[in-house]
Image (cartoon, helix red, strand yellow):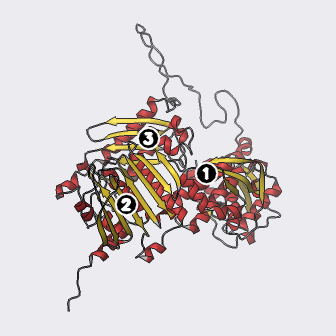
Amino acid sequence: MDIIHLLPDSVANQIAAGEVIQRPASVVKELVENSIDAGATLITVIVKDAGKTSIQVIDNGKGMSETDARLAFERHATSKINNANDLFAISTMGFRGEALASIAAVAQVDLRTKLKDAELGTAITIEGSKILSQEIVQCPEGTQFTIKNLFFNVPARRKFLKTDETELRNIIQEMYRIVLANPNIAFRLYQDKDIIFDLIASNQKKRIVDVFSRKRRNIVEQLVRVEVDTVIAKIEGYVGIPQSAGKNVPQYFFVNGRYMNHPYFRRAVAQAYDRMIDSDSLPMFFLSFTVDPATIDVNIHPTKTEIKFENEREIWSILVVAIKESLGKFNIIPPIDFDVEGKVDMPLVSKNEVPKMPQISYNPNYNPFNNTHGNGNVRNWESMFESKRNADFDVNIGNNKNDLSDSLIPLENDNFKDSLDFSFTESILYNEKYLLFVSKNLYVVDLKKAYFRIYFDKVLKLVDNQGLSISQKLLFPEIMDITEDEQCILNEVEVELNNLGFVLSDFGKNMIQIEAIPALISDESIDVTVMLHDVIDNIKAEANGVDSLKSILAQSVALNYSQLKKISLLSADQRKDVLHSLFDSTNPYLAPDGSVIIKTLNQFDIDKILSVK
């Protein structure tokens, strides 16, 4: 009995849709890219309920004929490819002919399109790959797509869509990639009746400023022009000055007008900033590559954001040199300070002067086994060791990273606290960073990380509404500028922020008012706007679901709290309180970011450190 059969077109299209159409943002991306290929100079996107209910994409491009409008919904129907050789010379956005067929398989689609200078246009209605109607209508030039009830016939896929705030944020981020790659096109984005942005056609720098100026008011002063043209690639765009680096900054690569994600080239940019920014900071950049289409492969991933280059190593070198040259040209790189320690002192010699031969001087009476030096002073080794012993030991602990990292072992004994007698344990504050105490062994506690863990547990309880947070009303409410996607994030974590003690309210377009803050930080010199921006940046970079949002929110707030503690002012009793709170926490050995809080030195480790010559 034969068991293999061909899948119906409707089922095959739904399978293809699983790769191409993952969420409303995928629909927006595919339709807007088609509008760009159609030569549109104005593209308007209107979404309702973050695209779950409706997505409209309207353009003033060249439109389609009646036949093309009908054929466009067939799988592998495309105007971009005629033979296999065309795959190696792709210069358009969409080319595989799967997008419209995939969208029509999982949504209700209305299309209205008219060619330029044509009297009438075409209207087509499709639902789940089935054509319900096709007729001649009167409509504007260009194309208008209306996508309704995405995944209406695939309830399992629709169930896994995120909240409206998350889906809208994904749409905004997808639009950012497109509008930055195409500054010569005007874009409008609406959520229901609210306009999110209205961007006029401009140049690349103006487009960057229009998109990011609300979050980075001085972004114009932070941009440095990069431009290099070689036979392999042309690279142009802007990078940020070292002072603009941060944990979550805009980073955009484009190739031949298409956004791409390329970790290899991202590391090249980071290398160009070597020793100019902190190791945990990232540089800002907006860089466009123009290469021969035959030297790249844009078809290795359905979303076409993963791109393979034929000359990756060569482009890496060009990219690093171009960025360094631009930073140096604009005096961004600090002046070189040559290290002359231990180098031979080369004296200046005039042109007609005969150089003198170098002379060697030495003391013929010097005896290294004698207890006196040539100057007759007796070295008291024992007293010197006594005076330096404690200091040398401290230096080993604080600075000898190679030895310490091997010898200090994270504590893993759950009963460790029971073996300590905190009431009699003396502690020493070292270098305003570490707490040292002895109880059988020598223990080293990183105080910043300890506070990080303590505050994280407290904040997480408040976020989960397991505790009662008290708000402290601000005498003068603070106004905070935010971007459209940041507003989505704040809406998404509004309940958690309220549980924590924040009271926020709208203050006009792209602004919020901070009316109250948690009493936990009311007496600390904290910049609340900076804290909230850190929270938003961390969520934007790492959030994968509602549960992780709570953890990221707690980490961001707790980290800000911990950085405020004045460790140098801790009394002996306060240091004991820190140890008690740490060992009462959920995990006294590891900070929320996974770093080690406390390590131990036993007798063997100390002997090893002191035996180093």
Q: What's the residue type where badge 2 is placed?
A: Phe
Q: Earlier in the sequence, mark 1 or mark 2?
A: 2
Q: Quadrant of residue 573?
A: bottom right
Disc 2 versus disc 3: nearer the observer: 2
Q: In this rendering, is residue 425 above or below 310?
A: below
Instruction: Name the residue beneath numbered marker 3.
Output: 272
Q: Position of residue 155 (x, y in %)?
A: 44, 77
Q: In this rendering, is residue 49 above or below 246?
A: below
SS at mark 3 in the image = helix
Q: Say whether residue 441 is left or right of residue 39.
A: right
Q: What's the residue type where badge 3 is placed?
A: Ala
For the point 47% across and 42% down, the residue is 208
Q: Which mark is residue 533?
A: 1
Label 3 packing within 10 angstroms: few (<14), some (14-19), many (20+)? some
Can residue 441 be seen here? The reply is no
Labels 3 and 1 touching (C-beta < 8 A): no
